[in-house]
Amino acid sequence: MLYVHSSPRALCPHVEWAAGRAMSRAVNFSWLDQPALDGSRRTEFTWTGQVGTGAAIASALRGWEHLRYEVTEEPTEGSDGGRWMHTPDLGVFFAQTDVSGNMVVPEDRVRYAMEVAGSNALELHRELRLALGQAWDDELEPFRHAAEGNPVVWLHRVG
């Protein structure tokens, strides 16, 4: 699945061209206004392809800093799935996924988090949130909800 959560209008045809090139076929997206960001558009596109196509799509879209997108590649009999998330502020995040769609944090990444955190529980939480892409999820969430036809509510942490 490809979710372009926000794209400037002028960039939309270029996004289609880049994604289509990564999928080795022409694609036409159905673009809608993105209520979470004035002047931007959003789209969802279901794709099928060979293992590695998700990485190719995410790489093709990586160069445009104004895009917010997610690419999901389902696992197959012989390979893990993957999830790529991109925001203008954070760049690209990648995680392997299992057959249920859960992110898989490799053992070495968990060990690194424990080593860096030592006995500091807050630092361990920070490292694990980073390993799970929490900052990307947090930034994309208002755009996901706006895509479902829900009103956008911006919450600001106080204090």
Image: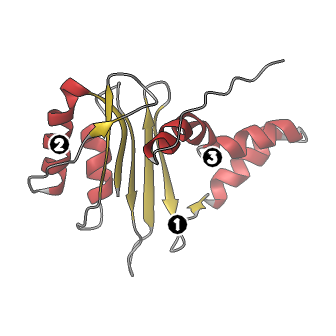
Left or right of 103? Residue 23 is left
- Circle 3 sits on which residue? 131
Q: CA distance from mark 1 to mark 3?
A: 16 Å
Q: Could you tell me if the residues under marks 3 and 2 are in contact, i.e. CB atoms within 8 Å?
A: no
Residue at the spot x=14%, y=35% of the render?
13
Q: Residues within 10 Å of mark 1 (few under 14, many from 20)?
A: some
* Residue 108 picture location, percent across and down: 64, 55
Asked which quadrant contains residue 34, the reply is top left
Q: Residue furthest left?
A: 26
**Amino acid type at image mark 2:** Glu
* Residue 158 picture location, percent across and down: 79, 19
Q: Could you tell me if the residues under marks 2 and 1 are in contact, i.e. CB atoms within 8 Å?
A: no
Q: Nearer the viewer, mark 2 or mark 1?
A: 2
Q: Is residue 137 above or below residue 26?
A: above
* Image mark for residue 30: none
- Residue sitting nearer the eye, 8 or 97: 8
* Residue 90 picture location, percent across and down: 50, 29
- Circle 2 sits on which residue? 16
Q: Is residue 75 above or below residue 16?
A: below
- Circle 1 sits on which residue? 101
